[in-house]
Amino acid sequence: MNEFFLSRVGVLVAIVFAALYISALLYIESETMVGALVIGLAILWLVGNRTGSSGRLSATIRKNTRYTGTLSLIAVITVAAFFYNDHFNLLMLTTVMIFVVACIGLNIQFGYTGLLNFAGAAFFGAGGYTAAVLTSNTAMPHLVVLLCGGIVAVLIGFILILPVLRTRGHYAAVVTIAFSLLFRTLVEVNQVLGGAQGAPVSGLNLFGWDFNKNFEIGGFEVSFYINYFIFASLLLLISIIFSRTLERSWIGLNLDTIRLDEVAAMCFGIDIARWKTTAFAMGNFMLGVVGAFYATMLGFIAPNNFTFGDSLIMVSIILLGGIGSIPGIILAAAIVIILPEKLQAIEEYRFLIFAVGVILILLFRPNGLIRRRMRIFPGVIVKADTSV
Amino acid sequence: MSDICLRVKRIEKRFGGLVALDKVDLDIKKDEVLGLIGPNGSGKTTFFNILTGIYPASGGSVVFEGQDITNQPPQVVYKSGVSRTFQRSRLCLELSVFDNVAIGDHPRLNHGFWHNIINRRMFWQEFQSCRNRVIELIDQFAPHLLDKMDHPVGGFPMIDRRRIEVCRALLGEPKLLLLDEPSAGMTEEETRQLTDEVLEIRKRKSNLSVIIIEHEMGVISKITDRCVVFNFGRKICEGVYAKVASNKQVQKAYLGEDL
């Protein structure tokens, strides 16, 4: 009982620390202080790994998922409340969450099924352009617009599905690279979609609630980005629950088997084309929805937001965090998006630094910062004495 | 006719100019254990790959339980009741023992979205019955793995991986089991254990025919009812082990001209 209590306190301390850390990181302006914070975390990380305390912590978290989830939710709300009138930091936090959802979508393709998709930003952009067209030309409810963003991304994905199914591994990846470059060129030269100048998108308006208006709570003027922040947290919550449920289902088992051994998968009845298509569609849908949402938040989109470089960033978030690992994606997305903003010194070199980071990770820690825990279905372990 | 499980007629496979299988005829009776032997490169594994639909045949036909399965995709072949193990074990090394075996249940499980994502109560019910089947099989063939069902397969020695492969192949209750060189990469002692286990499968499962590819003649002599010898893609001999072993042509194929 005592141990149970202690472990829960441990989780609480860890989450409070994480919330304080992220708030401090965002709040502090001095670049040297930010650098010191980053180095401090790296040292803490190494110490945690050496002493095995991070292993114990993650074991406790896995045992108390609901408790951890509730606390994390409270922590997220607290951090948002702390930055209640800070446009810039709320925008950044929301952007992190949007990229996390996008990468969770990509992860269903890459992490589970083994489909390496280098056109993440293109599908993200497809959702964004759908939002631009629909919000400026129709009076469609915005919730439907977001869904349409996802559907359009899925439909565009189907153009790619034939070559993707006919090729394997790196060759399929090359197909998506080609598409990524193609997409950008297409939106750039196509005047209907605003060409290189881009297109305006109106802000989100759900059930009469205008997301782009500051509002007041108890005399405090609250930044309108809080709206986007809350909606993004909701999307994030849904996508995490979806992805984890998917993983712990027969579909998740099919996808993993296809990634690890296509021949064995075929020989036991798994329809490779069906599940690859499904995984591709699921990932693209998430990318499209969140891309549409991102566009409404920025109020404006241009081809430059959806370059091949952005697709690379998404893939490197997955590689850095740990292929297949959702906690890894969250951590890596935070690093990849927040750091260049806070450390202007590295902004120019961010692609270089990420590339080096990814190479180092692949060399020394191929499972990523937080490696994926493989699914363990409940009740499959039978104790030797009870089996007879 | 009705006691024939599998009837292969004039099956042919050419890879470009190379004839891997040259008009092979083969019948397997119900409940029979057939040994498939022959030197390296004589077409044994190709034969399995054609039966299970991994390669399309260049000619001929395969009829299984009265159903024509020639050139059907592997998924259809598996559903009709043919399952197999692989020469170089093909397990998903990152996945747990349970996950690897449970794949064998694929055709029986509901893979719909509603069932898997939304209606989780039904999913867990189905999961329980699948779990029970998996545990029953592991309990029969690898009871020492029961408390390690969550361990990734990659950490186990070859013999355990073979056992897991056999359990996976048996989970769908096949009528024909194809074992591709189960003793490959094993010690003498392990081979002996494995032989006993194959005999055990025979005893426990009724209505199951087995074709086993094997180089260990000890295994072949102990467990097979009948043997077929391949050489250069042709069937050169057929009969009980003792008869096959004394056949001049077979000796020549294995040991060379001079002896």
Image (cartoon, grey):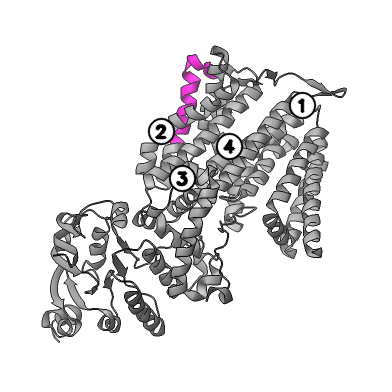
Whether residues under marks 1 and 2 lie with C-beta atoms below 8 angstroms apart, the answer is no
Please, what is the three-letter code of the amino acid marked with disc 3?
Leu
Chain-order first, disc 3 or disc 4: 4
Q: In this view, does A17 lie to the left or right of B37?
A: right
The residue wearing badge 2 is A158
Please, what is the three-letter code of the amino acid marked with disc 1?
His
Classify mark 3: residues with Cα within 10 Å, few (<14), some (14-19) or many (20+). Answer: many
Q: Where is residue B31 in the image (x, y as percent from the top left)?
A: 25, 72
Q: Position of residue B122 (x, y in %)?
A: 51, 49
State which chain disc 3 sits on. A
Q: Is residue A191 magenta?
A: yes
Residues at marks 1 and 3, CA–CA distance in whole angstroms: 37 Å
Task: Determine the main secondary structure of the stretch shown in magenta.
Answer: helix
The part of the chain drawn in magenta is A177-198
Q: Position of residue A115 (x, y in %)?
A: 46, 45
Q: What element carries label 3?
A: loop
Classify mark 1: residues with Cα within 10 Å, few (<14), some (14-19) or many (20+). Answer: some
Chain-order first, disc 1 or disc 2: 1
Q: Are marks 3 and 2 on the same chain?
A: yes
Please, what is the three-letter code of the amino acid marked with disc 4?
Ala
Q: Please state which of residues A288 and A40 is positioned toward the viewer in this rendering.
A: A288
State which chain disc 2 sits on. A
Classify mark 2: residues with Cα within 10 Å, few (<14), some (14-19) or many (20+). Answer: some
The residue wearing badge 3 is A115
Q: Please state which of residues A268 and A345 is positioned toward the viewer in this rendering.
A: A268
Q: Is residue A54 visible?
A: yes
Classify mark 4: residues with Cα within 10 Å, few (<14), some (14-19) or many (20+). Answer: many
Chain-order first, disc 4 or disc 1: 1
Q: Residue A87 carries which label?
A: 1
